[in-house]
Image (cartoon, rainbow, N blue to C red):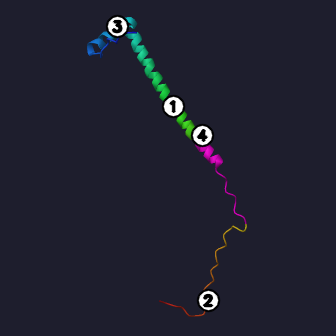
């Protein structure tokens, strides 16, 4: 059985000491390089996720286009009737004027 942990919440002094020890162990140059590598990795990950989403959207649209049935051309019985032809006005000499 182990006893209770005697570590309490970390205050600003404790955090400063931890950061100081890390800087002494690794050096400022190496820490900044690690930070830059971490930042570029995050950017690359976001770009890959965004590219993957656009590829997925494009594939979804292609599948929708492929699965939609083509409408067959209308057969002779389904073609709309020709519009009625206008009869020329008769020259009976009478006109209705309103």
- Tag 4 and tag 3, C-beta contact below 8 Å: no
Residue 29, position in %: x, y?
Answer: 39, 10
Q: Earlier in the sequence, mark 4 or mark 3?
A: 3
Q: Secondary structure at mark 3?
A: helix
What residue do we see at 35% from left, 6% from top?
A: 24
Residue of label 3: 21
Q: Secondary structure at mark 4?
A: helix
Indicate left or right for 2 with 57 as reference.
left
Residue 79, position in %: x, y?
Answer: 68, 67
Q: Earlier in the sequence, mark 4 or mark 2?
A: 4
Q: CA distance from mark 2 to mark 1?
A: 75 Å
Q: Residues within 10 Å of mark 2 (few under 14, many from 20)?
A: few
- Tag 1 and tag 4, C-beta contact below 8 Å: no
Q: Earlier in the sequence, mark 2 or mark 1?
A: 1
Q: Residue 87 or 80: which is nearer the viewer?
A: 80
Indicate left or right for 75 with 53 as reference.
right
* Labels 3, 2: front one: 3
Residue of label 2: 90
Q: Secondary structure at mark 1?
A: helix
Indicate left or right for 54 with 77 as reference.
left
Residue 59 is marked as 4
Magenta residue span: 58-75
Q: CA distance from mark 4 to mark 2?
A: 64 Å
């Amino acid at each position: 059985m182990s006893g209770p942990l005697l570590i309490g919440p970390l205050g600003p002094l404790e955090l400063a000491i931890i950061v100081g020890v890390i800087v002494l162990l690794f050096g400022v140059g190496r820490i900044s390089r690690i930070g830059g590598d971490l930042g570029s990795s995050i950017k690359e990950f976001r770009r890959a996720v965004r590219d993957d989403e656009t590829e997925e959207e494009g594939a979804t649209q292609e599948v929708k286009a492929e699965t939609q049935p083509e409408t067959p051309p209308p057969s002779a019985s389904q073609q709309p009737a020709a519009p009625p032809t206008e009869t020329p006005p008769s020259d009976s000499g009478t006109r209705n004027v309103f």
